[in-house]
Amino acid sequence: MKIFIDTAEVKAIREYADIGIVDGVTTNPSLIAQSGRKFEDVVKEICQIVDGPISAEAISTVAEEMIPEAYRLAEIHRNIVVKIPMTAEGLKTVKAVSASGIKTNVTLVFSASQALLAAKAGATYVSPFVGRLDDISQEGMGLIQEIVDIYANYQFETQLLVASIRNPLHFVDAARMGAHAATVPPAVLGQLLRHPLTDLGVEKFLKDWATVPK
Ligand code: G3P
């Protein structure tokens, strides 16, 4: 499973990219706003840090504006994946731009039918938001299993990118279900790495090593 980092904070991206566990980056307008920086500056810097798919979101709402916006975003860097909302106008855009080789990530997906339509439109990635479904008392990971089952019935090339991950269980379950990728916020990436028994074990080994005659 590919691991993307879900943030526009370049410091965190660098930290986890240095460890070697980052295959790509996803951003959205809220994450860009949190960074307090200009959209293009952040995206360009991210592209210098990670050599993998970098999702940058289109903010137009109608296809006639979203299509040129997608082309503009794709010109920023060869690794840009244009993130497009799961709306009728968004699907029109995905169909139009993917025909010319632009990679897309259909975002704000909350149902299996939306995931199927995005795949049929030619999306490179589809991003179901599991945490936001959990927030409204609907099991987010149940949707991931439905999408895995549906995609397995056909020859779609669309990759299932589990988004809105809030905890390590979301991540592990995504891998168990065979999702192609998961996008994980920096804090959760930290939780994935650490285990108290690892820390205690390292501490004890070092303590015992100090007693070995040198
Ligand atoms: O990148 C989109 C998605 O991962 C957002 O997550 O926590 O705002 O629902 P969240």
Image (tube, rainbow, N blue to C red):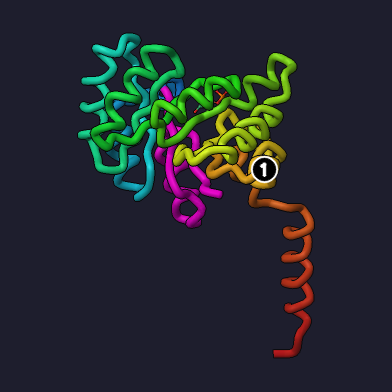
Would residue 50 be found to the left or right of residue 134 on screen? left
Residue 13 lies within the magenta run: yes
- Kindly give the residue lying farthest to the top in the view shown: 62
- Residue 184 at least partly seen: no
Q: From the top left corner, tell me how far across and down residue 167 is, in percent.
A: 68, 35
Q: Label 1 amino acid? A: Met
Magenta-colored stretch includes residue 102 = no
- The number of discs equals 1
- Residue shown at the point (37%, 47%) measured from the top left: 52
Residue at image point 31% right, 37% down? 80
Which quadrant is home to the C terminus? bottom right
Specify the farthest residue to the front: 154
Q: Quadrant of residue 166?
A: top right
Q: Horizontal and vertical percent for residue 176?
A: 69, 46
- The answer to whether residue 15 is above or below residue 120 is below
In front here: 85 or 205? 85
Question: Does 192 appear above or below 100?
Answer: below
Does residue 151 appear left or right of residue 36 in this picture?
A: right
Viewer-closest of 183 and 173: 173
Residue 87: which quarter of the image? Answer: top left
* Residue 204 visible (yes or no): yes
Q: Is residue 91 left or right of residue 143?
A: left
Q: Nearer the viewer, residue 152 or 43?
A: 152
> Range of the magenta residues?
1-28
Q: Position of residue 19 (x, y in %)?
A: 50, 56
Q: Position of residue 10 (x, y in %)?
A: 40, 39
- Secondary structure under tag 1 reads loop
Instruction: Say which residue appears at 28% left-offset and 17% top-offset.
Output: 66
- Image quadrant, ligand 1: top right
Circle 1 sits on which residue?
177
> Which residue occupies 44% across, 23% down?
34
Is the residue indicated by label 1 positioned so its CB lies within 8 Å of ligand 1?
no
